[in-house]
Image (tube, coloured by chain):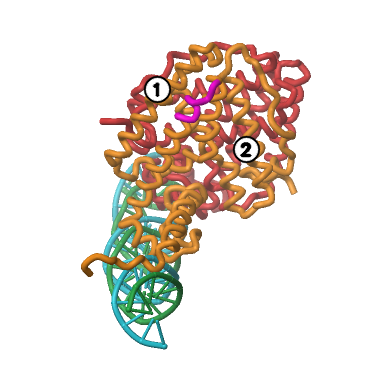
Chain colours: A red, B orange, C green, D cyan
Amino acid sequence: MTGSRRRAPRQAEAERNDRALLQAARDVLALEGSHASVAAIAARAGVGIGSLYRRYRSKEELFQRLSLLSLEHWNEAAERGLAAADPWDGLVGFITSCVEFGQGTLAPIAGTIEITEEMAARSAQGDALLATLVARARAAGVLRPDVTAVDVSLLIEQLGGSPVLDQLRRQGRDDLIDAATRARNRLIAICLDGLRTGGAVRPLPGPAPTDELFDERWVRGPS
Amino acid sequence: MTGSRRRAPRQAEAERNDRALLQAARDVLALEGSHASVAAIAARAGVGIGSLYRRYRSKEELFQRLSLLSLEHWNEAAERGLAAADPWDGLVGFITSCVEFGQGTLAPIAGTIEITEEMAARSAQGDALLATLVARARAAGVLRPDVTAVDVSLLIEQLGGSPVLDQLRRQGRDDLIDAATRARNRLIAICLDGLRTGGAVRPLPGPAPTDELFDERWVRGPS
DNA sequence: CTATAACGGAGCGATTTGCTCCGCAACGAT
DNA sequence: ATCGTTGCGGAGCAAATCGCTCCGTTATAG
């Protein structure tokens, strides 16, 4: 009591669990949408419900944390993009980083959680960073002049989710996830080519997606 | 009894209700995702639950009908595209028609309903039509040669949903829906430019989206 | 070994779900 | 008007699911 406190016996495990919980929450949100349950999140993290509620006082607090981390990732990606020597590479790096991080998976909980002051601050910061990034690319003449920061923001949100990937995961078709990921990267490349001036088209990455993927869409193909 | 049957007294109302139910189901699915309830669908259609269950034996049957209609729309759009004189215009018309019809809103129920034989047949038919459409555009030299039918199919699915629009509707910000719709049309235009050969970039449609929209994303901007 | 921080998950009350059932209303024929 | 028919709406049911609390158990630093 006077000075020497004990160390937490299982502190390392607690930190690992926290990271697992955050990732599991992202996964389950992408998988089940807005009605992702705390039970599902805890189960996917390989953690008891009790552990979740020791770390976060409520489901909302967990989602707030998730949102904040997402905003911070946005800002870090934007700063990396600004640090890049080439304006176009910087913009592309930012967009792909945000899309791959899965900003879009948070869309279903958008209106359901209260916005903290810290989140609002980070959000404003991110808006400013993106504006700078876009302005720099446009000034360099590599971004088509009629594309605005808002366009880019909406593009990221649109590409952030992946209905095909989500459905494959839901169905447990883990064997096709790599192929679907590569296929989505091609879509991103198409959009990026659409953003360039003069249409300096780069070849799409990787091999064309196979019909295998074709047959696993929301309506399965013929028998 | 022998020959003259009565006419159904309220048959016209029944047909109107059926159309309302189908549209309401699409809306609610976009709005609430996979856990859209029959009660919500009936309420949005301005119809009692009983009427829904007289028309469809179960929730699944309603969703099956919805999927079938969506497949039929796909096929009709593809046929219109093939009927167009210009291969590029035909492809663009098909893609925009499918995206605007909101094929993507059915993604959440993808794995949850059983696929009927009729659905599978229509799906196969749609696959063939799309392949023809893509082949024609590529042969005409207007579609970049590394883009496949699968790419186009995935692109439609990716653009089919609209996280921004859905959230605005959820929050009742009807005043911003027009602006958001126009903004999404710009995204579609960007993707289409990315699909063209040689990058014959067309100016983006309409005025650039305002910051108003910017502030209403999943995390609201600063106060 | 002991003390203690973190663990897992059974179980609670509240809510929501898909669906049935039945009294009522609106129409065409008489 | 009257009657027969058909579709209407929504109260209500059993079952499932939800967020969350509580407490006996387990693992580790000292």
- Tell me which segment is drawn in magenta: B79-85
Do the dots labelled 1 and 2 sit on one chain?
A: yes
**Percent from the top left, x then y, of residue B22?**
44, 52
| Viewer-side residue, A219 vs B4 | B4
Going 45% across and 38% down the picture, which residue do you hit? B73
Q: Do the residues labelled 1 and 2 touch (CB within 8 Å)?
A: no
Q: Main secondary structure of the magenta part?
A: helix
Amino acid carrying label 1: it is: Ala
Q: Nearer the viewer, mark 1 or mark 2?
A: 1
Q: How many C-alpha atoms fall within 10 Å of the one at disc 2: few (<14), some, or many (≥20)? A: many
Kindly state the secondary structure of the residue where label 1 is placed.
helix
Q: Determine if residue B153 is in view.
A: yes
Kindly state the secondary structure of the residue where label 2 is placed.
helix
Vertical position of residue B136 compared to residue D7: above or below? above
Q: Determine if residue A11 is in view.
A: no
Q: State the image quarter where residue B194 is shown.
A: top right
Q: How many C-alpha atoms fall within 10 Å of the one at disc 1: few (<14), some, or many (≥20)? A: some
Residue carrying label 1: A179
B102 with respect to A94 (left or right): left
Q: Which residue lies furthest to the left in this view?
A: B2
Going 54% across and 42% down the picture, which residue do you hit? A106
Q: Tag 2, which chain?
A: A
